[in-house]
Amino acid sequence: QAHLVESGGGSVQPGGSLRLSCAASGLSLEYYLVSWYRQAPGKEREEVSCITRSGETTDSADSVKGRFTSSRDSDTNTAYLQMNDLRPEDTAVYYCAVKFTRRPCGLLGLYDYDYWGQGTQVTISS
């Protein structure tokens, strides 16, 4: 059974940075598309970033373009979401999700993923 364990969330001031980690066990992330989603209270879960099996990255939400970047380290079997210039509206629970596929980003729905992480809280406040 595969598991995804997220870490790196926390509380920071506006303009700050955080790096979220998604450590995988029971699967090799290099063969998976990895998406990052977030869900704020009262809102739907939205994709914010994605990295394909081949390493192509996409900022999935206009609100994070130029600020968030996905990456993956095959040696540690961990995916990362680097978040810079954080804003109060970035406050949410962030999730990683993986799919064994060669498909590009942007074609998967919430129920298409093979595994989800448990989520990590990110709070941006002064």
Image (cartoon, rainbow, N blue to C red):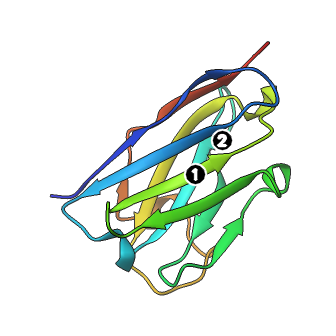
Displayed quadrant of residue 38? top right
**Front-most of residues 70 and 41:** 70
Figure check: 93 above or below 36: above
Residue 40, how many percent across, how many down?
A: 66, 31
Residue 106 at least partly seen: no
Report the residue that reaches farthest toward the top: 126
Figure check: 24 above or below 9: below
Q: Secondary structure at mark 2?
A: loop
Q: Quadrant of the N terminus?
A: bottom left
Q: Secondary structure at mark 1?
A: strand
- Give the labeled residue for mark 2: 44
Mark 2 or mark 1, which is nearer to you? 1
Q: Quadrant of the C terminus?
A: top right
- Give the labeled residue for mark 1: 81
Displayed quadrant of residue 60? bottom right
Q: Residue at x 47, y 65 (%)?
A: 72
Residue 50, how many percent across, how many down?
A: 60, 65
Q: Residue at x 38, y 46 (%)?
A: 117
Q: Residue at x 37, y 76 (%)?
A: 30
**Front-most of residues 25 and 85:** 85
The type of residue carrying mark 2 is: Glu
Report the residue that reaches farthest toward the left: 1
The type of residue carrying mark 1 is: Leu
